[in-house]
Image: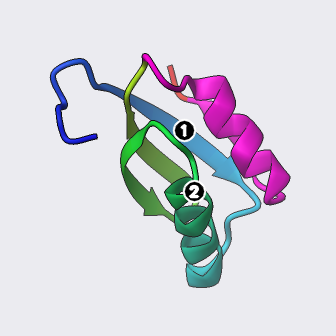
C-alpha cells in the first residue's frame, strides 16, 4: 500500500530484541504482515506505520510473539 493518508503510526518497546540479528529477524517478520506500510526497527524498540483498515497493533504483537519477541505499545 502506498497511500499513506489513512496510515497510523504505532510505537512499541520490544523484549527479546538484543542485537542486530534480532533487528533483522523483526524486519523479516514484519515484511510478511499484510497491512504494514513501513517499519523502523532498532534494538529494543520499533515504530510501525500500518493501514488500520487491514491490521492493528494486536496483529503486530501476535506476529512478533510467534517469533519469540514481546512487543508492548508505547503510550
- Using the image, tell me which numbered label, if any, was put on residue 12: 1
- Residue placed furthest toward the bottom: 21
Q: Nearer the viewer, mark 1 or mark 2?
A: 2
Where residue 59 sits, quadrant-wise, is top right
In front of the other: 27 or 12:
27
Q: Is residue 70 something that shows in the picture?
A: no
Is disc 1 placed on a helix, strand or loop? strand
Compared to residue 18, the image places residue 68 above or below, namely: above
Q: Which residue is rendered at x = 41% and y = 44% of the image?
A: 47
Q: What's drawn in magenta, residue-wise? A: 53-73
Q: Is residue 44 something that shows in the picture?
A: yes
On the image, numbered disc 2 is attached to which residue?
32
In front of the other: 40 or 7:
7
Q: Residues within 10 Å of mark 2 (few under 14, many from 20)?
A: few
Q: Which residue is rendered at x = 45% and y = 35% of the image?
A: 11
Would residue 67 be found to the left or right of residue 71 on screen?
A: right
The Cα atoms of the two marked residues, 1 and 2, are separated by 18 Å
Amino acid at each position: 500500500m502506498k497511500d499513506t493518508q489513512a496510515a497510523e503510526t504505532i510505537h512499541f518497546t520490544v523484549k527479546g530484541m538484543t542485537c542486530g540479528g534480532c533487528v533483522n529477524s523483526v524486519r523479516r517478520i514484519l515484511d510478511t504482515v499484510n497491512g504494514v506500510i513501513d517499519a523502523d526497527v532498532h534494538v529494543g524498540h520499533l515504530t510501525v506505520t500500518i493501514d488500520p483498515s487491514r491490521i492493528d497493533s494486536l496483529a503486530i504483537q501476535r506476529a512478533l510473539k510467534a517469533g519469540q519477541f514481546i512487543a508492548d505499545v508505547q503510550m
